[in-house]
Image (cartoon, rainbow, N blue to C red):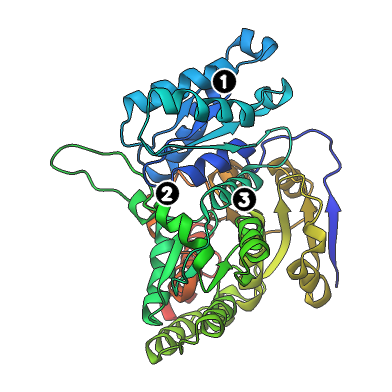
């Protein structure tokens, strides 16, 4: 059988899988302590992204807008940046990091964001905010190219380039997680703690799962500090878990400061988690402890209980962020499932050169299609036209109506997920993530068996 890589034939996009680059930059910015990003564009460029974040995390995040209107969209709006920076610094005296995130309108009109930052550094900051630490950082994310994935990658690279400074070796490992959930960061930190490895996590977002405290404060924010970002140039090495979400920054640290970089694979499933731990062992010299060997064994046992009877040969469609989709496809194959359709939803033309995709092409034993620049209408039409038969869909909440209308069970994974409670608290990565994800898949299929009266008697004797 073959694995075919194809481009979506339609020129337009109907029901996109991703949103735009500025959204990715905003997600990176909220992972930094004492940071509020200013999105240089219309108010909707912040409002709808904040809505996505609040839907996914059920919490509130601080982001600002330069609020460009019609006149600025025609004649330029750098004055709005100057006003926004001044108002933001007056209102939030603890803010130290202010990324200026561009959008399609301000990139099209050619606003010189780098120039206005230079002007503000030499003017407003010296005159009105003398003695206060403030970092203005240009993050160029025109939304007529790329997606939230590339926007995140660009922003992480911009933050690292601005702050990283060589000093004394700190003995730490840089861990660039990519666009993950708080539960994933918890799982990754657990693996590193078991190996007694000290790491700088970019970005430290466990605190996104924030409490409501007696003083009624409820804002969520990341806890990666300026010192953490500065120290990335003094690390032992960098592991970027996702090639397309942090790989650019890892490569910069390697080229500029000689910090060895390992990019991927995303530690979804047993084999990729094994690879992650072996990479940590190689880079730090720390052994893999017996506790993780046992944890791995528990995960393998949990998967063995499900694979042959319930998961084998089930046909799956997967959509979402490219590293997530590829990692999920590899995991499904290890579970003896058949990921017959992978949808990658932006204009990146390099996916076909990814070694992981090339490995799928060379090794799959069933028919698989990988659709580039895809949208969710591509999934819908293939199901309606009976071009693909599916037992399961894996993806974020925006594909829910395709699953409902076509009576296909669906497991929510990725961003945004807003129609299931608390998924951001639970990991997809690591051995714990492998167990949770496999059992979620199995339980979703069990429920489908019961509703469709499809061999549901097996569940009585299993």
Q: Which residue is drawn at 46% across and 61% down?
A: 231
Graded by Cα atoms within 10 Å as few (under 14), some (14 to 19) or many (20 or more), the crowding at tag 1 reads many
Graded by Cα atoms within 10 Å as few (under 14), some (14 to 19) or many (20 or more), the crowding at tag 2 reads few
Q: Earlier in the sequence, mark 1 or mark 2?
A: 1
Question: Please, what secondary structure does the residue beneath circle 3 have?
Answer: helix
Measuring from the top left, give residue 51's x and y in whole percent.
46, 33
Eye-nearest disc, 3 or 2: 3
Q: Which of 448 and 157 is in front in this view?
A: 157
The answer to whether 317 appears left or right of 1 in the picture is left
Residue carrying label 3: 153
Q: Which of marks 1 and 3 is nearer the N terminus?
A: 1
CB of mark 3 within 8 Å of CB of mark 2?
no
**Which corner quadrant holds the N terminus?**
bottom right
The answer to whether 205 appears left or right of 357 in the picture is left
Question: Please, what secondary structure does the residue beneath circle 2 have?
Answer: loop
Specify the label residue 420 is tagged with: 2
Question: Quarter-wise, where is residue 119 in the image?
Answer: top right
Eye-nearest disc, 1 or 2: 1
Measuring from the top left, give residue 299's x and y in whole percent.
46, 81
CB of mark 1 within 8 Å of CB of mark 2?
no
Vertical placement of residue 69 versus 159, above or below: above
Vertical placement of residue 171 versus 315, above or below: below
Q: Which residue is drawn at 36% across and 49% down?
A: 208
Measuring from the top left, give residue 243's x and y in whole percent.
66, 61
Residue carrying label 1: 42
Measuring from the top left, give residue 369's x and y in whole percent.
80, 60
Vertical placement of residue 390 versus 40, above or below: below
């Amino acid at each position: 059988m073959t694995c075919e890589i194809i481009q979506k034939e339609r020129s337009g996009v109907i029901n996109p899988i991703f949103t735009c680059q500025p959204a990715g930059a905003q997600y990176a910015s909220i992972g930094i302590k004492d940071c509020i990003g200013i999105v240089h564009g219309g108010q909707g460029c912040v409002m709808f992204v904040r809505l996505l974040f609040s839907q996914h995390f059920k919490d509130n995040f601080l982001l600002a807008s330069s609020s460009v209107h019609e006149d600025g969209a025609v004649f330029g709006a750098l004055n709005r940046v100057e006003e926004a920076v001044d108002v933001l610094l007056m209102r939030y005296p603890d803010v130290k990091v202010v990324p200026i995130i561009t959008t399609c309108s301000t990139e099209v009109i050619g606003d010189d964001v780098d120039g206005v930052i230079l002007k503000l550094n030499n003017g407003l900051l010296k005159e009105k905010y003398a003695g206060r630490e403030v970092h203005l950082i240009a993050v160029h994310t025109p939304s007529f190219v790329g997606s939230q994935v590339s926007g995140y990658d660009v922003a992480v690279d911009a933050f690292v380039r601005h702050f990283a400074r060589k000093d004394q070796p700190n003995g730490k490992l840089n861990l660039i997680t990519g666009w993950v959930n708080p539960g994933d960061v918890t799982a990754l930190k657990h693996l590193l703690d078991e190996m007694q490895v000290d790491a700088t996590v970019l970005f430290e977002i466990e605190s996104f799962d924030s409490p409501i405290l007696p003083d009624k404060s409820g804002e969520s924010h990341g806890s990666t500090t300026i010192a953490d970002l500065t120290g990335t140039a003094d690390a032992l090495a960098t592991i970027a878990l996702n090639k397309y979400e942090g790989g650019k920054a890892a490569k910069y640290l390697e080229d500029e400061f000689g910090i060895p970089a390992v990019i991927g694979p995303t530690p979804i499933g047993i084999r990729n988690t094994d690879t992650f731990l072996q990479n940590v062992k190689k880079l730090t010299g720390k052994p893999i402890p017996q506790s993780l060997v046992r944890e791995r064994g528990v995960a393998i046992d949990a998967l063995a209980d499900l694979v042959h009877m319930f998961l084998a040969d089930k046909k799956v469609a997967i959509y979402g962020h490219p590293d997530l989709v590829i990692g999920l496809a590899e995991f499904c194959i290890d579970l003896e499932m058949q990921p017959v359709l992978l949808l990658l939803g932006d204009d990146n033309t390099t996916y076909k050169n990814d070694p992981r995709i090339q490995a799928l092409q060379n090794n799959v034993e069933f028919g698989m299609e990988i659709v580039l620049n895809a949208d969710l209408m591509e999934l819908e039409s293939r199901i309606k036209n009976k071009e693909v038969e599916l037992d399961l869909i894996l993806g974020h909440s925006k594909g829910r109506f395709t699953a409902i209308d076509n009576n296909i069970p669906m497991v929510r994974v990725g961003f945004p997920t807003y129609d299931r409670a608390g998924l951001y608290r639970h990991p997809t990565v690591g051995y714990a993530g492998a167990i949770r994800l496999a059992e979620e898949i199995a339980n979703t299929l069990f429920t489908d068996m019961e509703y469709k009266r499809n061999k549901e008697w097996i569940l009585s004797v299993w």
